[in-house]
Each structure stands twice: as structure tokens, then as C-alpha cells.
Image: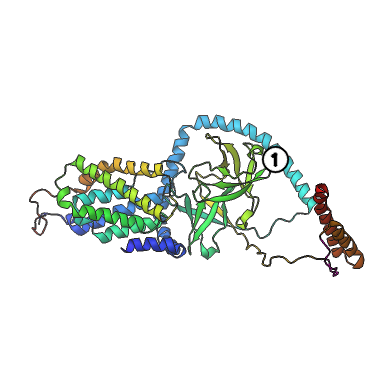
Amino acid sequence: MDDPWWRSLLAYRALFLGLALLTLFFRLLPSGQTPGSLPGPDVLLCLILAWMVRRPEYLPLSVIVIVILMEDLLLQRPPGLWSAIVVLATEFLRGRVTLTRELNFPVEWMLVSGIMLGMMLVNRLVLAIVFVPQPGFGLVLVQSLWSIAIYPGVVLLSQLAFNLHKPAMGEVDRAGRRL
Amino acid sequence: MGLLGLFLLWRIDSPRVERLRADLIDTLVPNLEWAMRPVTLLSGMAEDFQSYSRIYEQNQELKRELQQMKAWKEAALQLEQKNARLLDLNNVRLDPKLTHVTGVVMADSGSPFRQSVLLNVGARDGIRDGWATMDGIGLVGRISGVGERTSRVILLTDANSRLPVTIQPSLQTALLSGENSPLPPLEFIEDSDEVRPGDRVVTSGDGGVFPAGLLVGQVVLGSDKRLRVDLAADFQRLEFLRVLRSHDFEVISDAGGLIVPPVTVPLPDTSAEALESAAGEAPTETEGGNVEALGSGLSEGGDAAATPGADDG
């Protein structure tokens, strides 16, 4: 085995949890948002989608649910709804992993952008149906656009720093099975 | 799907789920504090460093302001003496129950759509929902959500915040409604012609949630020609916040009985003269200052009621 230990599945899962906690931590810092300023990107969402397109096996359903539900609860969002939407989106991607493996990056980016906008719209729709007061549409749209804009950055960082890439043709895992 | 179930449960029975949320924050966030402290300190130092680079301009500016402040200080001293004299004359006692608990801001919500902060005081320190929170100068928000060791303050700038206020010196009442902007607008002003930019805005105490007379800020005219409030509290750097212990408000339990003269007068017909005469007789037949005052009040009421009828006739 020439693979070092940090290539293993569990190590990547732990890494993801660490990154998720880190983003959450920075959003909780009291150095905070001045009211009225434009919202920044949703880094965690980018991270989840980027990893899901590349290596879905690193992000089991349970990990995603735990991370997003915790974010829901800590950031004063309606608990459960956004988690459910993220789960739906990731399962949608997981089901199409053979398709996304063939896509080149611009097409993948477009696909992910579409998913992000769709998630945002579904979220607003459900909130509107159950009469929960919502922030202005412009603010949310800006946040989605920001997320779309930094998505390539997140992908690049994942590839360079964590060696995360789509499995190549005929690549095998440590046990020798084909990916 | 369990998650959607949770969402529906939250929508139906929000308080229970919110309590769960408060418990979670209560256990998680204080544990993160050791990590948050240095990062916050570093960012504070970076900001300070930026201000060092503008030190000369600042110095000039401060000197100018100091000059103005000296004039103000003189005015303030005179006013303070005058105020003390007037208070003495009126024999005013300040409310002894209005004490406060001071807390340190631990974290903010981190979300651009929710303007709130977490304090490190909670139910353990006797904090309760709805109490007013101030920094050294002005009102900051209200407690909404109390955990054992933490509590959440919804800021005045949050889109869910509504605060009944009085605008001085015209004593117009209005509603300060947050909308995620640094200058929240005033709504439902009785007569907006009487309100000028620069007027003081204080809490009115209507609705019985906040004590009256807490400083909120100054009226300014927004760029969209709406009247807005420049908040007195420094929302850029909320660090130490005071939670004002407001006492329980008294509730008026009965609907109020009918106040009648103690003598049983056979109910007269509705003409004003009969009412007046009945009221006039009442004090003569009984002793006691209370009843007398009541009788005269009633007779005035009778007069007032009589005049429009006379006009009509």
C-alpha cells in the first residue's frame, strides 16, 4: 500500500466535518455583520456540492444532515427545511454521479449554479406557503450569486489542498476495486 | 422525511423547538469561546492598527471636537444643576427596581438576515424573555430566547423588531420597525409634520414590555425621504450590554365597576338637567371628601354632555 493513511475514506469524512465546523465558527464570530451590508457566499454549500460532484462516497447522508441541521439551529434559520433541501439536492447529484463524472468544468459549474438557484427558490416557496417572514429577495439572490461565483475557488482549493478530484478512468481504490 | 417533519413541528409548535435550539446553543457556544476570543482579539487589533495609520488626521479631528465638547460640558453642567434642583422640587424618587445585569457579547448570529447577538448571561442570572438591553448609552434590543447560561438579544435593526417610541419634544408616538438597515425607519407617526431631524427618540413604554424613557436615538431624514432613527447605541462594537430588570407589570383584572353616587336616586330620564341636579345633590347628603370630589366630577361630565344637545336644539 503506497497510499498514505490520510487518503482513506474516514480521513476525508473527518476533514469535511472539520471544514464545516470551521466555516460555522467563522460565521459565529462576533466581529460580525453590520446591518444592511450585502451577505457573503454560503461557503459550506459550495463545499458540499463540490465534494458531492467529485467523491460522493466521502459525504454520507448522515454527515450532511448533522452538519446542515446544526447550522440551521445555530444560525436561527427555520430548523429542518434548509437541511431537507440540501439533502434532496445532494441525493439528486449522488444519483447522477455517472453523468457528472463525464462533464467538463464549465458544464458542471452551470449544473451546480442551476441547483443552487433552484434550492433558493424552493426554500422561499416553502417558506411563503407556510407564511414565515422572509428576508428580501434581492439579498438572497446576492448570496446565491456570491456562492456561484466562489464555487470554482472552492473546487480549486479542494483539488490543490486536499487532492480531491473526480476518479479517472480505471482508477482503483485501496482495496483494488474499480471506482 | 424527518427534517421536513421537524420544520413543520417548528412551524406549529415554535416555542418548544426554539427551546431545543436555545439548549443546543447553550451547550455549544460557550465551549467555543476559548477559540473565539483570540480571533476576535486579532481582528480588533487589526482594526486598531488601521486607525493608527490615520492618527494625524484623527488627532486634528479630536482637537476640534474637544473644543466643541468643552462648550457642551458647560451647558451640561448647568443643566445637571438645574435638573437636580427641579427633581428636588418635585420630590422625585427614581424607580428602585430598575436595576441591571451586565453581560458580555459572546457571538452574533452570523447570518446577514438576523440581527441578534448572544450574551453570556442566562436563566441562571435571572434573565427573562422580553427584558430591555442597552449598551452604555442607548437601547440595543430585547431578550428573546433564554438558555441556562446564554441568552439571545434581538437587535433593534432586526427585521422582526418593533418598538413603540415617543419623539421628543413634540411627544409624537411612533413605531420603530427594524428592517436590516443601520437606520431603522419610524412608522405610524401621528403627525409627521411635527417631527424634525435631530429630535430625540425614547421608548414610550406602550404595550408594557419596556420601561418608558430609555434613550433610543435621534431622528434623521433618510435618503429616501423617510424619517429614520440614528441609534444612540454603538451597533458597530457591541461588547458589554446591560439587561434591565423590568418588574412584572400589573394587570388590570376587572373591567371596572360603574361609579355611582352612594345615594340611591331613582334613575332620572336622560335630560341633562336631571343628571346635573342629581349630581349636585349628592355631596350635600353625604359627608366625606371622596364622594364630594366624585360628585363634582360627575356634574362637570353632565355639563359637557349637555352642551352639544343644547347646540342641536
- SS class of the residue under badge 1? helix
Which residue lies at the image location 57% right of the left edge and 41% below the top edge? B229
Q: Amino acid at mark 1?
A: Ala
Q: Who is closer to the viewer here, B67 or A47?
A: A47
Judge whether residue B5 can be spotted in this image: yes
Question: Would residue B173 appear left or right of A105 to someone viewing this image?
Answer: right
Judge whether residue A166 can be spotted in this image: no
Q: Who is closer to the viewer here, A112 or B135?
A: A112
Q: Quadrant of the N terminus of chain A?
A: bottom left
Residue B224 image position (x, y, % from top left) = 52, 35
Residues rendered magenta in the picture: B261-269
Q: Is residue A137 magenta?
A: no
Q: Chain of mark 1?
A: B
Residue A73 image position (x, y, % from top left) = 39, 58
Question: Would residue B275 appear left or right of B99 to someone viewing this image?
Answer: right
Q: Who is closer to the viewer here, B311 or A19?
A: B311
Within-10-Å neighbours for mark 1: few <14, some 14–19, many 20+:
few
Residue lying furthest front in this view?
B313
Which residue lies at the image location 45% right of the left edge and 33% below the top edge? B53
Which residue is denoted by mark 1 in the rendering?
B76
Question: Would residue A8 appear left or right of B56 to someone viewing this image?
Answer: left
Q: Who is closer to the viewer here, A69 or B55?
A: A69
Residue lying furthest bottom in this view?
B264
Which residue lies at the image location 27% right of the left edge and 55% below the top edge? A88
Residue B264 image position (x, y, % from top left) = 85, 70
Q: Is residue B264 magenta?
A: yes
- Can you say whether B97 is above or below A140 in the image? below
Residue B251, located in which quarter of the rendered image?
A: bottom right
Question: Would residue B268 appear left or right of B33 to someone viewing this image?
Answer: right
